[in-house]
Image (cartoon, rainbow, N blue to C red):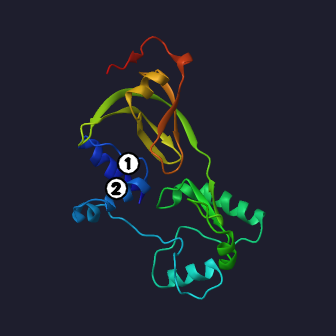
Amino acid sequence: FKDEFFRINQERIKNGEAVFANPRNAAAGSLRQLDSKIAASRNLVFLPYGLGQNTLKHKLLSQKMKYIYNLGFRKPPRNSTCQSYDDIQKIYEIMKNERDSYEMMLDGMVIKVNEISAQIDMGYTVKNPRFSVAYKFPAVEKITTIKEIVFQVGRTGVVTPVAVVEPTDIDGVVVERATLHNFDEIERKDIRINDKVIILRSGDVIPKIIKVLTHKRDGSELKVKR
Protein backbone atom coordinates (compact mmCIF):
# COMPACT_ATOMS: atom_id res chain seq x y z
CA PHE A 1 0.00 0.00 0.00
CA LYS A 2 2.89 2.38 0.77
CA ASP A 3 4.44 1.83 -2.67
CA GLU A 4 1.09 2.50 -4.35
CA PHE A 5 0.70 5.79 -2.46
CA PHE A 6 4.17 6.94 -3.50
CA ARG A 7 3.53 5.82 -7.11
CA ILE A 8 0.36 7.92 -7.30
CA ASN A 9 2.14 10.98 -5.93
CA GLN A 10 5.05 10.54 -8.35
CA GLU A 11 2.57 10.48 -11.24
CA ARG A 12 0.90 13.62 -9.92
CA ILE A 13 4.26 15.39 -9.68
CA LYS A 14 5.04 14.47 -13.31
CA ASN A 15 1.65 15.82 -14.37
CA GLY A 16 2.15 19.07 -12.47
CA GLU A 17 -0.58 18.23 -9.96
CA ALA A 18 -0.55 18.80 -6.20
CA VAL A 19 0.52 15.70 -4.27
CA PHE A 20 -1.80 13.98 -1.82
CA ALA A 21 -0.85 14.77 1.79
CA ASN A 22 -1.66 11.26 3.03
CA PRO A 23 -3.30 7.97 1.95
CA ARG A 24 -6.64 9.06 3.44
CA ASN A 25 -6.78 12.07 1.11
CA ALA A 26 -5.63 9.95 -1.81
CA ALA A 27 -8.41 7.41 -1.24
CA ALA A 28 -11.07 10.10 -0.80
CA GLY A 29 -9.89 11.93 -3.91
CA SER A 30 -9.92 8.69 -5.90
CA LEU A 31 -13.49 7.83 -4.87
CA ARG A 32 -14.68 11.30 -5.88
CA GLN A 33 -13.44 10.84 -9.43
CA LEU A 34 -16.24 10.90 -12.01
CA ASP A 35 -14.18 8.54 -14.16
CA SER A 36 -14.32 5.15 -12.41
CA LYS A 37 -11.26 4.00 -14.39
CA ILE A 38 -9.11 6.44 -12.39
CA ALA A 39 -10.30 5.01 -9.07
CA ALA A 40 -9.80 1.46 -10.40
CA SER A 41 -6.22 2.26 -11.44
CA ARG A 42 -5.25 3.26 -7.90
CA ASN A 43 -5.65 -0.18 -6.32
CA LEU A 44 -7.72 0.94 -3.33
CA VAL A 45 -7.98 -1.54 -0.45
CA PHE A 46 -10.84 -1.70 2.07
CA LEU A 47 -10.06 -2.60 5.69
CA PRO A 48 -13.11 -2.45 7.97
CA TYR A 49 -12.42 -1.29 11.53
CA GLY A 50 -15.96 -0.90 12.83
CA LEU A 51 -19.66 -1.17 11.99
CA GLY A 52 -22.50 1.30 11.68
CA GLN A 53 -26.13 0.44 12.27
CA ASN A 54 -26.56 -3.34 12.14
CA THR A 55 -28.64 -6.22 13.47
CA LEU A 56 -25.76 -8.37 14.75
CA LYS A 57 -26.39 -9.64 18.28
CA HIS A 58 -22.81 -9.65 19.55
CA LYS A 59 -22.24 -7.84 22.84
CA LEU A 60 -18.60 -6.97 22.16
CA LEU A 61 -17.01 -5.08 19.28
CA SER A 62 -14.23 -7.67 19.17
CA GLN A 63 -16.85 -10.38 18.53
CA LYS A 64 -18.44 -8.37 15.74
CA MET A 65 -15.12 -7.72 14.05
CA LYS A 66 -14.11 -11.39 14.30
CA TYR A 67 -17.36 -12.24 12.53
CA ILE A 68 -16.67 -9.65 9.83
CA TYR A 69 -13.12 -10.90 9.23
CA ASN A 70 -14.38 -14.49 9.05
CA LEU A 71 -16.56 -13.38 6.14
CA GLY A 72 -13.35 -12.69 4.23
CA PHE A 73 -12.72 -8.98 4.81
CA ARG A 74 -9.09 -7.97 5.18
CA LYS A 75 -7.77 -7.63 8.73
CA PRO A 76 -5.67 -4.70 10.01
CA PRO A 77 -1.98 -5.49 10.66
CA ARG A 78 -2.65 -5.93 14.38
CA ASN A 79 -5.56 -5.77 16.82
CA SER A 80 -5.89 -6.89 20.40
CA THR A 81 -8.31 -6.94 23.32
CA CYS A 82 -6.72 -5.32 26.37
CA GLN A 83 -7.69 -5.55 30.03
CA SER A 84 -5.60 -2.71 31.45
CA TYR A 85 -3.65 0.42 30.64
CA ASP A 86 -0.43 -1.61 30.79
CA ASP A 87 -1.81 -3.96 28.12
CA ILE A 88 -2.64 -0.98 25.91
CA GLN A 89 0.83 0.48 26.38
CA LYS A 90 2.46 -2.85 25.45
CA ILE A 91 0.49 -3.01 22.19
CA TYR A 92 1.38 0.62 21.49
CA GLU A 93 5.09 -0.06 21.91
CA ILE A 94 4.88 -3.12 19.65
CA MET A 95 3.05 -1.22 16.91
CA LYS A 96 5.35 1.79 17.21
CA ASN A 97 8.37 -0.47 16.67
CA GLU A 98 6.74 -2.48 13.87
CA ARG A 99 5.02 0.42 12.06
CA ASP A 100 7.41 0.52 9.09
CA SER A 101 7.02 -3.22 8.48
CA TYR A 102 3.25 -2.86 7.91
CA GLU A 103 1.90 -2.67 4.38
CA MET A 104 0.03 0.56 5.07
CA MET A 105 1.27 3.85 6.50
CA LEU A 106 0.21 4.50 10.08
CA ASP A 107 0.49 7.54 12.31
CA GLY A 108 -0.96 5.84 15.39
CA MET A 109 -3.52 3.39 16.70
CA VAL A 110 -7.11 3.72 17.93
CA ILE A 111 -8.31 2.52 21.35
CA LYS A 112 -12.00 1.60 21.61
CA VAL A 113 -14.32 0.51 24.40
CA ASN A 114 -15.15 -3.11 23.62
CA GLU A 115 -18.61 -3.43 25.19
CA ILE A 116 -21.33 -2.31 22.75
CA SER A 117 -23.76 -1.24 25.48
CA ALA A 118 -21.06 0.95 27.01
CA GLN A 119 -20.40 2.51 23.60
CA ILE A 120 -24.09 3.37 23.31
CA ASP A 121 -24.12 4.89 26.81
CA MET A 122 -21.03 7.00 26.08
CA GLY A 123 -22.42 8.24 22.78
CA TYR A 124 -20.94 10.88 20.49
CA THR A 125 -19.89 14.50 20.45
CA VAL A 126 -20.88 16.55 17.40
CA LYS A 127 -18.00 15.03 15.40
CA ASN A 128 -16.45 12.14 17.32
CA PRO A 129 -17.40 9.05 19.34
CA ARG A 130 -16.67 9.27 23.05
CA PHE A 131 -15.84 5.56 23.24
CA SER A 132 -12.66 5.72 21.14
CA VAL A 133 -9.47 7.75 21.16
CA ALA A 134 -6.42 8.05 18.89
CA TYR A 135 -3.01 7.17 20.34
CA LYS A 136 -0.46 8.77 18.00
CA PHE A 137 3.06 7.56 17.26
CA PRO A 138 5.87 10.11 17.71
CA ALA A 139 6.78 12.09 14.61
CA VAL A 140 10.14 11.32 12.99
CA GLU A 141 12.52 14.21 12.27
CA LYS A 142 15.75 14.32 10.22
CA ILE A 143 18.15 16.98 8.95
CA THR A 144 18.65 17.33 5.21
CA THR A 145 19.58 19.93 2.57
CA ILE A 146 17.29 21.66 0.09
CA LYS A 147 18.77 21.09 -3.39
CA GLU A 148 16.08 22.80 -5.40
CA ILE A 149 12.58 24.24 -5.17
CA VAL A 150 10.26 23.31 -8.02
CA PHE A 151 6.79 24.56 -8.80
CA GLN A 152 3.82 22.37 -9.60
CA VAL A 153 0.94 23.79 -11.57
CA GLY A 154 -2.32 22.00 -10.87
CA ARG A 155 -5.24 21.58 -13.23
CA THR A 156 -6.91 24.64 -11.72
CA GLY A 157 -3.81 26.75 -12.29
CA VAL A 158 -2.73 26.84 -8.63
CA VAL A 159 1.06 26.87 -8.25
CA THR A 160 2.45 24.81 -5.36
CA PRO A 161 6.15 24.97 -4.40
CA VAL A 162 7.88 21.68 -3.50
CA ALA A 163 11.35 21.30 -1.98
CA VAL A 164 13.66 18.75 -3.57
CA VAL A 165 15.98 17.57 -0.79
CA GLU A 166 19.00 15.35 -0.43
CA PRO A 167 17.66 11.76 -0.26
CA THR A 168 17.14 11.08 3.43
CA ASP A 169 16.18 7.80 5.09
CA ILE A 170 13.45 8.30 7.68
CA ASP A 171 12.61 5.00 9.36
CA GLY A 172 13.05 2.99 6.16
CA VAL A 173 11.44 5.52 3.80
CA VAL A 174 13.78 7.46 1.48
CA VAL A 175 12.48 11.04 1.36
CA GLU A 176 13.41 13.20 -1.64
CA ARG A 177 10.67 15.85 -1.57
CA ALA A 178 8.95 17.92 1.07
CA THR A 179 5.80 19.99 0.77
CA LEU A 180 6.02 23.77 1.13
CA HIS A 181 2.28 24.49 0.70
CA ASN A 182 2.63 28.05 -0.65
CA PHE A 183 4.91 31.07 -1.13
CA ASP A 184 3.81 32.63 2.16
CA GLU A 185 5.27 29.68 4.06
CA ILE A 186 8.58 30.05 2.19
CA GLU A 187 8.77 33.71 3.20
CA ARG A 188 7.56 33.15 6.76
CA LYS A 189 10.17 30.43 7.42
CA ASP A 190 12.80 32.17 5.23
CA ILE A 191 13.42 28.94 3.32
CA ARG A 192 16.30 29.09 0.84
CA ILE A 193 17.92 26.73 -1.66
CA ASN A 194 20.98 25.02 -0.05
CA ASP A 195 19.53 25.51 3.44
CA LYS A 196 19.97 22.82 6.06
CA VAL A 197 16.48 22.04 7.34
CA ILE A 198 14.65 19.72 9.69
CA ILE A 199 11.99 17.66 7.95
CA LEU A 200 9.26 15.78 9.75
CA ARG A 201 7.35 12.66 8.81
CA SER A 202 4.54 11.66 11.15
CA GLY A 203 3.56 8.28 9.79
CA ASP A 204 1.13 8.81 6.93
CA VAL A 205 1.97 12.41 6.09
CA ILE A 206 4.13 13.70 3.24
CA PRO A 207 7.29 15.12 4.88
CA LYS A 208 7.26 18.82 5.62
CA ILE A 209 9.92 21.33 6.61
CA ILE A 210 9.45 22.42 10.20
CA LYS A 211 12.63 24.43 10.80
CA VAL A 212 15.45 26.11 8.90
CA LEU A 213 18.88 25.78 10.52
CA THR A 214 19.96 29.35 9.84
CA HIS A 215 23.07 28.97 12.02
CA LYS A 216 24.44 26.49 9.46
CA ARG A 217 24.29 28.93 6.53
CA ASP A 218 27.61 29.53 4.74
CA GLY A 219 26.59 32.16 2.19
CA SER A 220 25.74 29.74 -0.64
CA GLU A 221 22.02 29.86 0.12
CA LEU A 222 19.72 31.37 -2.52
CA LYS A 223 16.44 33.11 -1.85
CA VAL A 224 13.40 31.82 -3.70
CA LYS A 225 11.82 34.21 -6.18
CA ARG A 226 8.11 34.19 -6.90
Disc 2 packing (10 Å; few <14; some 14–19; many ≥20): few
Reply above or below: 141 against 219: below
The residue nearer to you, when weighing 14 against 131, is: 131
Q: Residue at x 66, y 73 (%)?
A: 119
Residue 113 placement, left or right of 102:
right
Q: Nearer the viewer, mark 2 or mark 1?
A: 2
Residue 145: quadrant of the picture: top left
Three-letter residue code for mark 2: Gly
> Is disc 2 in contact with disc 1, using a CB cutoff of under 8 Å?
yes
- Report, in whole angstroms, how far the alpha carbon at label 2 lies from the one at label 1: 9 Å
The residue at which mark 2 appears reads as 29
Residue lying at the far front of the rendered structure? 126
- In the picture, measured across the screen, residue 86 lies left or right of residue 136, that is right
Q: Is residue 4 visible?
A: no
Please state the horizontal and vertical placement of residue 64, each as a whole percent of the image. Answer: 58, 82
Q: In which quadrant will I find the C terminus? A: top left
Q: Who's the residue at 39% across and 67% down the image?
A: 45
Q: Which residue is mark 1?
A: 20
User: Mark 1: few, some, or many residues within 10 Å (few <14, many ≥20)?
Assistant: some
